[in-house]
Image (cartoon, rainbow, N blue to C red):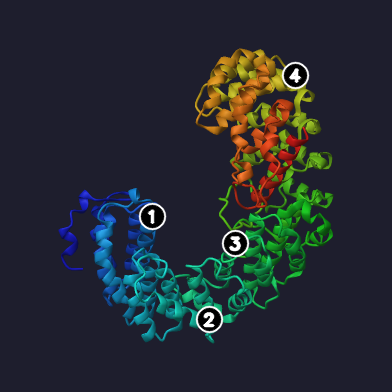
């Protein structure tokens, strides 16, 4: 590395984890003779200088010339890893707001760019590809980038490197000033549309679509032929994509952003490669998670994949039918045929099987054939559903094919409480031996709470759990959900309220009220807590007290304008429940639903809609702007929740309008 790094005052600079004093040592390790150690040092530099992005740290401009020096040395073992870091930094500098780019980065980048472009002619094709990727990722003008990229194109004979060059040319043509070789670059890319190489045709469409988002329209068949061709595996060697068929399918599907299922149907056509079939279902999941209308067109193909020889294909097909739920109920017989399919998903640690996905699908269809299998899960003799809830980001055009937790399946089966209760009662009666057992009992109590009075036969088991210091809060919530039918719990709950402090004391007192007891203990404990920061759960319990909570009105009114929307919404509901005030509460609730017609859905929107429905005619202003909801799915989370959230919020709107 020479003495260069020592001339920088690294202690005065910072990266994602503090002072940058450790950077020169890592740079030297990157230049070391041991490949494993060099790779580890490059990975550590990526973590320090980039981490998850979001800014360009002060140490990045200082490190940039040394990173390029490493990349230019043929003796360095981690050249491509170093260039990957440079690509991340160059791309992030163009994505984030200027205030998040440390002063000095622009000058450092201008000084580094000639070195990057020089690597386009490196003897190592992997380095050439990485340099092309950086040229495509950076924000330098086309007038600077296009000459170097075009000159390299004429000399490049490696097909994969040409793929990366084509994509870089497409992006460089979008960067003003584009310079005098803009038209030449466009003509070259258009010429590749007639290339005998399918992947060059694919790369050319992507490159030209960078400057013309509608360019792919009318070229669907060309793209499908390329994506489904065996040569799609070339992209695994690309520095820009580094993915096989599934990744290229998803990438190319983004060229068709609307609800039309035409491209997806092409991907779902039969193919001898299992990865192609899995990838087609992954794209279908992303489309269905984003739009409501393609379900009818895609459903027959999903049903056709239930007999696929590959377990992952069968799993994904039935999991998507589960997501569609009631819409797919006409295919319940085909789904039930998989109840005996014990094939586990490959490379997935959770142990989910095709049969588990079929159970979930039948539960979503409200089909009683799911009940025996779910009873086995409740008893613990089968394990495929998670013990706890998991949330996945609602990434645009992406679907997480995972199952819910067991209690989340049970919660929705309100029409089948009676046949499920014996298994639930047996499990609740089993004394927990481990923390995991306690967690299972807690989640089952959540399901019982959601089932409400229909779960009254579980009261004896819940009373036993009420005696345990580990399980009593969950049992209290379940007993509260059952309501007055759990009157035998009033005394023990009151004892818990007197013997406990904080939130748990309020929980016990509230459950005492919910089971038919005196409201005074709940009011005494909940009223002071209503003013605490983010008191969502306290406010919900206070709302259940109805007019008994009227003395809390002065505490509740200031919360209607809280910055936290959950606090505002739940305070508005509690105030209306306590006083009947609609003049101040309805506007606060309307604020939480006003942007729904624009497609903005947050988790707080659903309870706000339900509260407005309870208020009734005074909330009629909501009807003015909620009649027309967008055609895309309204959701905040990803995975199966993208579908259930959309269903729940639309049903809530329908109930509100009907009222």
Q: Secondary structure at mark 2?
A: helix
Which residue, given by chain and number where applicable, does mark 1 sit on? Answer: 51
Q: Nearer the viewer, residue 55 or 188?
A: 188
Is label 4 in a helix, a strand or a loop?
Answer: loop
Q: CA distance from mark 2 to mark 1?
A: 38 Å
Nearer to us of marks 3 and 1 is: 3
- The quadrant in which residue 423 appears is top right
Q: Position of residue 269 (x, y in %)?
A: 70, 73
Of tags 1 and 4, the one toward the viewer is 1
Q: CA distance from mark 1 to mark 4?
A: 54 Å
Tags 2 and 4 in contact by the CB under 8 Å rule?
Answer: no
| Few, some or many residues within 10 Å of mark 2 (<14, 14–19, 20+) | some
User: Which residue corresponds to the image point at 75% horizontal and 57% vertical from the top-left?
Assistant: 358
Residues at marks 3 and 4, CA–CA distance in whole angstroms: 54 Å
Q: Locate residue 110, reporting x and y percent.
A: 26, 64
**Where residue 193 is drawn, which disc sits there?**
2
Q: Can you say whether 24 is above or below 629 in the image?
A: below
Which residue is nearer to you in this view: 646 or 631?
Answer: 631
Q: Quadrant of residue 298?
A: bottom right
Q: Which residue is mark 3?
A: 257
């Amino acid at each position: 590395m020479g003495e260069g790094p020592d001339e920088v005052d690294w202690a005065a600079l910072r990266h994602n984890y503090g002072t940058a004093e450790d950077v020169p040592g890592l740079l030297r390790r990157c230049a070391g003779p041991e490949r494993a150690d060099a790779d580890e040092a490059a990975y550590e530099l990526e973590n320090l200088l980039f981490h998850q992005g979001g800014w360009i740290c002060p140490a990045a401009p200082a490190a940039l010339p040394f990173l390029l020096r490493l990349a230019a040395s043929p003796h360095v073992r981690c050249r491509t890893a170093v260039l990957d870091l440079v690509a991340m930094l160059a791309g992030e500098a163009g994505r984030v707001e200027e205030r998040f780019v440390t002063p000095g980065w622009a000058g450092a980048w201008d000084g580094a760019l000639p070195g990057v472009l020089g690597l386009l002619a490196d003897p190592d094709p992997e380095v050439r590809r990485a340099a092309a990727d950086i040229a495509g990722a950076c924000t330098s003008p086309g007038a600077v980038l296009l000459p170097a990229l075009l000159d390299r194109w004429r000399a490049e004979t490696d097909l994969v490197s040409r793929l990366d060059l084509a994509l870089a040319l497409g992006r460089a043509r979008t960067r003003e000033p584009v310079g005098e070789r803009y038209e030449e670059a466009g003509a070259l890319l258009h010429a590749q549309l007639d290339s005998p190489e399918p992947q060059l045709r694919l790369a050319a469409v992507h490159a030209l679509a960078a400057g013309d988002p509608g360019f792919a329209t009318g070229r669907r068949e060309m793209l499908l032929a390329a994506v489904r061709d065996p040569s799609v595996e070339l992209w695994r060697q690309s520095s820009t994509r580094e993915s096989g068929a599934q990744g290229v399918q998803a990438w190319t599907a983004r060229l068709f952003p609307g609800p039309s299922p035409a491209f997806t149907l092409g991907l779902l056509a039969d193919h001898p490669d299992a990865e192609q079939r899995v990838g087609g279902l992954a794209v279908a999941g992303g489309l269905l998670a984003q739009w409501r209308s393609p379900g009818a067109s895609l459903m027959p193909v999903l049903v056709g994949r239930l007999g696929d020889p590959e377990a992952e294909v069968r799993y994904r097909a039935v999991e998507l039918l589960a997501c569609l739920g009631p819409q797919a109920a006409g295919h319940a017989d085909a789904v039930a045929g998989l109840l005996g399919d014990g094939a586990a998903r490959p490379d997935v640690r959770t142990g989910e099987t095709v049969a588990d996905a079929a159970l979930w699908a039948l539960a979503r269809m409200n089909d009683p054939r799911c009940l025996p299998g779910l009873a086995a899960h409740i008893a613990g003799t089968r394990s495929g559903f998670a013990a706890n809830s998991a949330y996945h980001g609602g990434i645009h055009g992406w679907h997480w094919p995972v199952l819910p937790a067991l209690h989340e399946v049970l919660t929705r089966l309100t029409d089948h409480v009676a046949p499920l209760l014996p298994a639930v009662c047996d499990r609740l009666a089993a004394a927990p031996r481990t923390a995991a057992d306690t967690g299972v009992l807690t989640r089952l109590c959540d399901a019982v709470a959601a089932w409400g009075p229909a779960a009254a036969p579980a009261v004896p088991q819940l009373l036993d759990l009420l005696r345990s210091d580990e399980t009593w809060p969950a049992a209290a919530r379940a007993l509260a959900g059952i309501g007055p039918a759990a009157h035998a719990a009033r005394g023990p709950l009151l004892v818990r309220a007197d013997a406990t402090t904080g939130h748990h004391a309020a929980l016990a007192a509230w459950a005492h009220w919910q089971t038919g007891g005196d409201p005074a203990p709940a009011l005494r404990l909940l009223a002071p807590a209503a003013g605490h920061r983010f008191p969502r759960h306290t406010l919900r319990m206070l709302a259940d007290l109805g007019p008994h909570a009227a003395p809390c009105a002065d505490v509740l009114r200031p919360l209607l304008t809280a910055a936290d929307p959950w606090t505002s919404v739940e305070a508005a509901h509690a105030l209306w429940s306590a006083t009947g005030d609609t003049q101040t509460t309805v506007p606060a609730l309307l604020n939480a639903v006003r942007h729904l017609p624009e497609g903005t859905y947050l988790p707080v929107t659903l309870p706000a809609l339900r509260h407005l429905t309870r208020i009734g005619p005074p909330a009629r202003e909501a009807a003015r702007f909620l009649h027309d909801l967008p055609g895309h799915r309204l959701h905040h989370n990803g995975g199966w929740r993208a579908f259930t959230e959309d269903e729940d919020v639309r049903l809530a709107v329908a109930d509100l309008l009907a009222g």
